Image: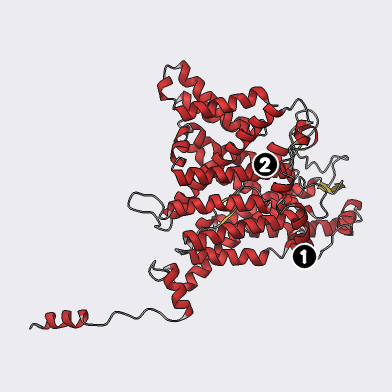
Amino acid sequence: MSEQAQQTEAVESRPAPEQPKSFWGKVDNWFGITKSGSNFRTEVVAGLTTFMSMVYILMVNAGMFQGVITDSADPYGAAYVATAIGAIIGTLLMALFAKMPLAQASGMGINAFIVFSLISSGDDATGLTYANCMVFTLLDGVIFLVLTVTGLRRQIFEAIPAGVRHAIPVGIGMFIAFIGMQQAGIIVDDGDTLTSFVSFNVLDENASFVFYVGGKVGGMLPAIVAIIGVFAIVVLSKKNVKGAILWGILGSAVLYYILLAIAYAANVAAAQAIFSDVSISNPFNAFVAWGHDSAGAVFYEGFNFDAYLNTGNHNVGSLVVVLITSALSLCMIDMFDTIGTLYGACSKGNLLDKDGTPIRMEKMMLADAIATCTGAIAGTSTVTTFVESSSGVVAGGRTGFTSLVTGICFIIAMFLSPIAQLIPRCATATALIWVGVLMMGSVIKVDWEDAADAIVAFMTFMVMLLGYSISKGIGMGIITYVIIKVFTGKVKEISIPTWVIGLVFLATFLLTE
């Protein structure tokens, strides 16, 4: 027997390696960490990176919903805990069910749609309540779940015109950036044009460095902080610093209090009033508020639409239309956002199959749908896969152990609401503005040389922005698409699902305000 044959026989006769008997060995096997080419250290670092990249959602989402959770002793705390629970459930589903290195939380854009379009405030109030919108969110999750299980998801996705699909993230980006600028006082209502750039004129005797009215901070100070904060996020992102958004928010908060302290020392009354209202509460108060005002509100308050029916010219017919279109809009936004994020994040970690589809795609979609349903019951807006998960994948995360680490971090953060509440709105607004910038990338996917495609996309995101409504933007885009196809002799290109969705939105415009 030759030497080579002897070596081959020796190798083949070796006993198979023993399965790891230790706890960590079993964890490795279950998640497939070593098999994926990763290791525990890399997975932990990746999980921490993802958490640092997206933990800002706890503060931003709580800040947005605190104004619509009425009659609550601690609306911020209730929203904060609800958001954390949604993130924990969604992320752990990704970890233990889908076994993928992605994390979930209340989606940016969708939360804005609920707070500023479905509910709104002041003279623009629709009459819909926070609990009512949790019903819409729950329906969104159920629809998404059914579409995923039955395979209809692909058909619905393909029924939305390409121009609208490409314009949705652009419109949402512009919309939430605009909201961020309003919250920071960069864009203000001057009474004439409705929107105006804040004045930084130091020579103007009427200009105010900072004022404090009704618990809201205004003047130059918050605008300056927000602008500097956005620039900081840009610089950190350009230098590939992990958690750039979080550091931008925290840095802006520090700057805010430094400038406020200077104003306090200069005997500025507004600064003194702001500091006098600063306090740190018991973190468990937030859980009490959550249990009282958010948990299960979808069931015991959500189906009471009396406020809506008593507002304007609303009736049962318009309520049915709003119910259908709102749930459908939430589902469409959720589905497009999730699919885009899954493809984008997985492509960065070689987590695609031979056809270019993310591995365990159906399990990830089911995790998303289940998280949205449970999140609605907990009292938070649609839970979706976060694009910031890409940061963890880029850091080397390849398995569900990465998202397990992220989920554990969210569990710890859930108890820090009193500290998070000290973050001013002008600091969290930096995240809204920067995320808006990131979502503008899809504008290059629009075929601007094609007049039909261009007008469809344009109407979609302009109505979203100027009409202050994401759903109306989507509806206007689809209706525009149908009209253009009809009058250019291409009726056959309009699919039946597209006709149905277009007619539903048309009914919304004709029967509701």
Quarter-wise, where is residue 30 in the image? bottom left
The mark found on residue 442 in the picture is none
| Kind of residue indicated by mark 2 | Ile
Dot 2, crowdedness within 10 Å: few (<14), some or many (≥20)?
Answer: many
* Residue pictured at 45% horizontal, 31% vertical: 447
Residue 369 visible here? yes
In the depicted structure, whether residue 505 falls above or below residue 202: above
Q: 469 and 427: which one is in front?
A: 469
Q: 75 and 257: which one is in front?
A: 75
* Residue pictured at 80% horizontal, 55% vertical: 74
In the depicted structure, whether residue 132 falls above or below residue 241: above
Return the residue at label 1. Answer: 284
Dot 1, crowdedness within 10 Å: few (<14), some or many (≥20)?
Answer: some
Q: Tell me which numbered mark, 2 or 1, is placed earlier along the sequence.
A: 2
**Left or right of 3: which side holds 339?**
right
Q: Quadrant of the C terminus?
A: top right
> Whole-percent x and y of residue 146?
51, 44
In the depicted structure, whether residue 222 falls above or below residue 161: below
> Whole-percent x and y of residue 281?
82, 63
Return the residue at label 2. Answer: 114
